[in-house]
Amino acid sequence: MRPDRKRLAHALETAELQFRLAAAVRLAASDGRQPRDLPIVWSHGNHSVRYEDIALTESDADRAAHFLLQTATFLLAAQIKDVLLACFRDPKNHRTKQVRAAYQIARLIRNAFAHRPFAPTWSIDKDCQDRVFTVPRVISIDTSGLHEQKTNWRDYGGPLALLLFARWARNRVLRIPPSTPGPVEQPDLKYYQVGKLLLRRIDGEKPEADT
């Protein structure tokens, strides 16, 4: 059965949108600008809660935003894995080295997050240990010494590597070209981010670090 490429692309794009939204929430929470409004009374079906039951402090929001971005990153890997499984009969043993590498990278990252979502830990199969899996100019993992170690962004290149990996899967595997974006309104506040260092630009002045 031929894969439903449009459905797969829609799911992958949705995961990317969630990742981008989570990144925006993380930035706002780090800068103390994330709204925390919730209903005074929230009823759904047979249950109801009051504001006091679900209210967030600023530190609550900052903590939750960190893990929101982490789980959104995991979701990208899970969707990439689904795309590869749908489009190739046996991606693990595919004749193309790049497809084999992409599958193992997506699978290993997905497993690390899925088994321990709040403390991702590598679980490297014996046949994948002490090997390097690479999708050139996109993402790479050297599994040497990673088994049972806590996942570090440096192991796979970080969240932007996963974002580019998702776009690679959509463009190169699903063969669906990127959508043409409409006009993008520039934000009132201009941020620059390097790793976890967040800089906010003040008009007429150099960007200042957010501490």
Image (cartoon, rainbow, N blue to C red):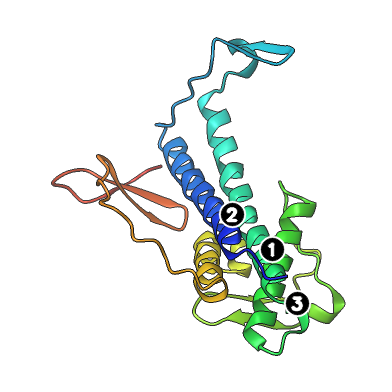
- Which label's residue is closer to the chain start, 1 or 2? 2
* Image point (73%, 67%), residue name: 108
* Label 3 neighbour load within 10 Å: few <14, some 14-19, many 20+: few
- Which label's residue is closer to the chain start, 1 or 3? 1
Residue 109 location, x and y as percent?
A: 69, 63
Residue 74 location, x and y as percent?
A: 64, 55
Secondary structure state at the residue bearing disc 2? helix
* Image point (69%, 63%), residue name: 82
The C terminus is located in which quarter? top left
Residue 11 location, x and y as percent?
A: 59, 54
* Image point (44%, 31%), residue name: 34
Residue extending furthest right?
Answer: 126
Determine contact: label 1, label 2, CB under 8 Å: yes
The residue under label 3 is 89
* Label 1 neighbour load within 10 Å: few <14, some 14-19, many 20+: some
Residue 82 marker:
1
Residue 11 marker:
2
Three-letter amino acid code at the position of disc 2 = Ala
Place residue 152 in its image quadrant. Answer: bottom right
* Distance in Å between CA atoms under marks 1 and 3: 12 Å
